[in-house]
Every structure is written in structure tokens, then in C-alpha cells.
Image (cartoon, rainbow, N blue to C red):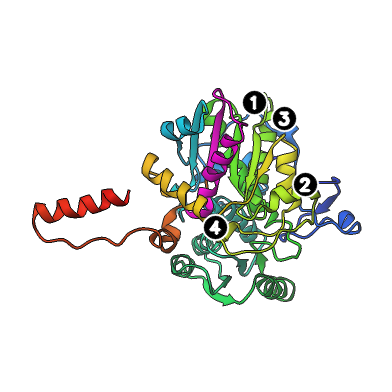
Amino acid sequence: MSAFTGALACLRCGTQVAARQSATPCPQCADEGLAIACLPVYDHDQLGPWGPDHERPGLFRYSALLPLHDSAKPVSLHEGNTPMLSCDRLAQRLGVGELLIKDETRNPTWSYKDRLAAVAVTQAVHAGAEAVVVSSTGNHGAAIAAFASAAGVPCVVLTLASVPREMKVLMQVYGARVVALRTGPERWKVMEQLVHERGWAPMSGYVDPPLGSNPYGVEGYKSIAYEVVEDLGEAPDVVICPTAYGDGIAGVARGFAELQSLGVIAKVPRMVAVDPLGAYEEGLRNGLGARVPMASTVSFSTGTPIATYQGLWAMESTGGFAVRGMSDSEILAAQFEAARLEGIYLENSSATALAAAHIIAESGMFSSSQRVVLIGTSTGLKDTTATAAVLPAVPIIEATTASLDAALGAMDALG
């Protein structure tokens, strides 16, 4: 039986509101000019001993701690249960006791957004949604499109013309109707109209300033924390999470907090947010609403100029911190390092977690006894163009070993 009470509550002031599909601000905090998310509330006293129900598919084995009615039929593609990869070579470079990557590229649409999509689409279908709509530059849209297809619900994706071809294909192939607009605010304007005028279920945020995504979907990320603890037997010391509007890092932090309150773990890990423009470092320094200049970045899906309260909360509630902004060269170097040392090809937005780990190591904040987990949010196969741009052309050789040796020598000379 689910411990979900049916209500949502503000992360900041605790004000409870009735269940609703969209991520709209807490009314009390909005009166103070603050955009704060309201997330699901649970009565943990209803729970028996903690543990997954392996008879349920995907992350729905954790249904007792998901915001779903007991009668809701899971929309699952067997998401979750992704491996924890031990990265010994990277651990040595970083000077930590153990470095692990939670490999979310193994999800059905190759990103951790499938966890959000599974819960959000299940809730929307149970609530009787006639259609779902999402504003996305790729991973989020692909995940919602796939799960909407599995549920038999129409899906519209509002994207940008600038997103990589691979991302557009992934959104379209599942049957979503995909259209592009010029700017993010234009997408949100259209999405707001579709939600309020047509009653379509919103699978992402659409308000400005942003506060997060579908409140039910955010809870899907809690399952990452559950799986990490199942694999390790305890919480790690540090978890580094690529962050845009804070859905992922907030959900993971809430998962660890629940396990602590249930007595499963003694402590929660320090949550570290990383974004390419440094919005979260700026938010911690100067408060909610502080902005950094928008700029082009190879980590386009996490390139936000402003932090959300839920993302800041995840760090502040765990004694965590944010990492400064980073250059394209730092991100690409991390992407190549993970691929060539550990055999893991991460999308650039995901590789920011490893780039951040290097920044932390250089600052002396790691110790040789720490266990560090990076959330590998998405595969590099989502954006091969960015990778290919810094790779040499593949040489065409004659059918002789001499020609091969010459080509290999040229490659060695390039490093």
C-alpha cells in the first residue's frame, strides 16, 4: 500500500495543497515573491519494513514510496535497476577511495528521465488525461514520448530547432508530435495555454522563473537513492548530479532522506549540483533568483542561468555544495576520459559530473577514504555531433600492413 497521502507540500514553508498535475508555485511563498515547488507528502507510519516489491515492474517495485494510488496501473518499460560501475582508474586520478558511476544510460530511452516519465505518465493516465505535453531539448521529451506511447496517450513535445538531430529522432520515433519554437519562454507560453485551455497533463515545468517539473515525476528519481543503497548496503559519502531545474538532484536527495527517516541508513550523502554555467554556485552565494549570463555550451540540456529552490534545497539539506561553471573543453575532456579509461560514453551534460569531480579534487575537498557516486544521466549517443567535432577523421588506407602502420603512427603522433 502506498504511503502517499494525496497532498502536496511546499519544500520551504510546508504549506499543503491539494493534488495537482502541474508544477505551480506554493501560494504562500508566491505572495512573498518566491517560486517554490510543492511535492508529494507521505505518511511513513503506514509502511511496513522497507524493501522493494519484486513482483512489480521497473521502479514500481518501490510503489509504497511513490505518489500513486494503489489502483493506478503502472506504465513501465522496465526502467531503473541500472548498474553501479566501479571506476578504479578514475578513482586513482581523483584521489578518492572509491568512485562509482550510476549508469542511467541503461534505461529504456538511455537516460534517467525514464524514471520521471514512468511515474508522471502513470499518474496522468490514472487521473484521466486525454493527452500529455512536455517542453524539452531532448532526454525529457524522448522519455515522455516513449512512456506515453506505452500508455496509448497522445503526446506533444515542444522543443527548440537547435537541438541535435539524434534528440529530435528519439522524440519523434515514439510517435510524439514534435514542434520547435525559437526560445524557451515561447515554449512555456504555448504549453501553459495547452494545460489551462485544453486540460493536457504537463510533464515538465512551464513557469518563469522555473521551479521544477511535474511533481509526481520528480519522485521517480527517489528510486536512484533506493538502488544505490541496495547496491552498497549504505549511503555513499558524496553524490554528484548534473542539474538544470533540480528535478533529479531533489528527487535523489528526498530518496536518501526517506531512507534515513526509516532507519535504513545512518546518514545522507552530500549532494553536489553541477551545471555548466555556474547557476547553482551563484544561487548558493546570492540566494534564490540570482542569475548568471546565458551562454552556449555543449552541455545544452543543463545550461540554465538560474537555480531552482528544490535544487538549492537538495544541497543545503545535505551539507552539499555546487561546483563552478565549466568550459566546453573541460566537459569534452571528461567525456573522453570516461570513455577511454572506463568504457562509458556519457552525454556531455552527464560528463559534467566527472568534470566537477576533477574540480573538487583539485580544491582538496576529497579524501582517500571517501566513496563518491556520479549520476551518469544520459548516453553520448544522444549527441554524437558534439563528440565528432573534436575527433580526427577516420583515415582510408590501402590494403597493406604498411599503410595500416603509417595510419596508426599518425594517430599516435596526435595522441
- Give the CA separation, mark 4 to mark 2: 23 Å
Tell me the amino acid under the disc marked 4: Ser
Q: Which residue is mark 1?
A: 265
Going by the numbered disc 3, the residue's amino acid type is: Ser
What residue would you read off at disc 2? Answer: 285
Task: Give how far across and how far down residue 304 sits, in percent.
Answer: 65, 59
* Residue neighbourhood size for the residue with mark 3, other residues' Cα within 10 Å, grouped as few (<14), some (14–19), many (≥20): few
Identify the residue position indicated by label 3 in the image. Answer: 261
170 lies above or below 336:
below
| Image-based side of 141 in relation to 305, left or right | left
Residue under the image location 71 percent in, 35 percent down: 318
Question: Which numbered disc, 4 or 2, marks the residue that appears first in the sequence?
Answer: 2
Write the start and end of the magenta stretch as one range: 347-375
CA separation in Å, label 1 and label 3: 8 Å
Identify residue type, mark 2: Arg
Mark before the other along the chain sequence, 3 or 4? 3
Is there CB contact under 8 Å for labels 3 and 2? no
Which of these two is toward me, 294 or 187?
294
Mark closer to the chain start, 3 or 2? 3
- Residue 173 position, x and y percent, is 43, 68
